[in-house]
Image (spheres, rainbow, N blue to C red):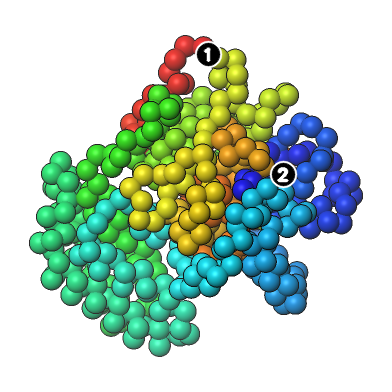
Amino acid sequence: MAAIISCHRYSSSSQLTSNQKFVSHFLPSKCSKRPFYHNATTQQFKPLCSSRKSTPFVPVDEQRDRYSSIKKTAISVALAVGLVTGFPDLGYLGQANAAAIAPALPDVSVLISGPPIKDPGALLRYALPIDNKAIREVQKPLEDITDSLKIAGVKALDSVERNIRQASRALKQGRTLIVGGLAKSKVDDGVELLNKLEVGLDEFQKIVEDRKRDAVAPKQKELLSYVGGVEEDMVDGFPYEVPEEYRNMPLLKGRATVDMKVKVKDNPSINECVFRIVLDGYNAPVTAGNFVDLVERHFYDGMEIQRADGFVVQTGDPEGPAEGFIDPSTEKTRTIPLEIMADGEKAPFYGETLEDLGLYKAQTRLPFNAFGTMAMAREEFDNNSASSQVFWLLKESELTPSNANILDGRYSVFGYVTQNEDFLADLKVGDVIESVQVVAGLDNLVNPSYKIAG
């Protein structure tokens, strides 16, 4: 199964056939300096956001409105068929794998069952390698407040109050089990966070009793940050061994946070934007480690956004003939393998898509559910060709409904934009990444090549 391929550069959409124009909305791929033969492009970017004036931000929903409901239905049907047969015109599905994909047809309903989690913070919390039911029972009702707030007006507060009471009860009943699940070296920090959480739940109850709906979402975010901190304090070391063939590569054994600052051109609403991105090395140590190593080399600083088509934003294709990072120590392009962590597995799969492995029902630990999901671009027919080109998915796309998309299990997801993600939709080709900086978690990077002379 093909992956998001390198970006093929073109000067305008008029150079594409009508079919290529359609495909270009949906395929992230590695950028290549060759003439345009394929139907995919790839680029990268970085932001934190300041306005030139108080023009309101136009939500990405308005972009989606350009598609009629008929088109949405047609695309959804096409997607379901494509999962089984492959599209001749969509290289990323890979005709060579069409026969292997055929058994997936009965499982499409499984892929789309249940409400998907779309919040990047929630996805990261649930992706932590822990097994503590007690803390999850505190977390879930707090996460559910997001759905409760979909109810109009103050009526939502009745549902929120039930969520708070459920979380408070779970904390009181499960506190001993939660503390028992903390890593020994992190007990003090975990207990302190639990105390803050307990006080915060009482404050939250008062907010609801005072019918202050506008204060609910900020308080929910605060309490979930405590929950996430407690859950991170349950992780004791790195949970598995990376395969020997990748063990000497830069590896992120844990998580790191980066800020990507993007200079936005020709936009009356935005001058520059800083995007905060959390990288998950627990589930993608090779991929995340490769990116952090490149960040520390300032590889992306000054690079332009190379693709921004409403489906993805992409960058990472350096100037010159190379399509990835040239390692000075070898004078060759450094590539990394496809890396996919599936639910229920103790370690990622390497070099093969979930379809290649026959795991048609498997769900990925880091799914393409959130707006701003970050992943590696690669060559279409080479699972292990990713190097430096990355992309961010702009959700919701008609071709990638959450829990039923053509990207999960085919591309290495290694993080999510957790702040200012909505502004990704404002980025354009030519906007400049001024800087990418690691602001937390650099100590989790092992085998950093950027420290080696040359």
Q: Earlier in the sequence, mark 1 or mark 2?
A: 2
Q: Secondary structure at mark 1?
A: loop
User: Looking at this view, is 384 or 286 the one in front?
Assistant: 384
Q: Position of residue 262 (x, y in %)?
A: 60, 42
**The quarter of the displayed image where residue 172 is located:** bottom left
User: Looking at this view, is 346 or 320 the one in front?
Assistant: 346
Q: Position of residue 164 (x, y in %)?
A: 27, 76
Q: Residues within 10 Å of mark 1 (few under 14, many from 20)?
A: few
Write down the residue under mark 1. 329
Q: Is residue 241 above or below residue 40?
A: above
Tell me whether circle 1 and circle 2 mark residues in contact (CB < 8 Å): no
Q: Residue at x 42, y 53 (%)?
A: 342
Write down the residue under mark 2. 41
Mark 2 residue type: Thr
Q: Residue at x 34, y 86 (%)?
A: 158
Q: Residue furthest bottom?
A: 155
**The quarter of the displayed image where residue 407 is located:** bottom right
Left or right of 392 on screen, residue 321? right
**The quarter of the displayed image where residue 210 is located:** bottom left
Left or right of 264 on screen, residue 249? left
Q: Is residue 139 above or below residue 387?
A: below
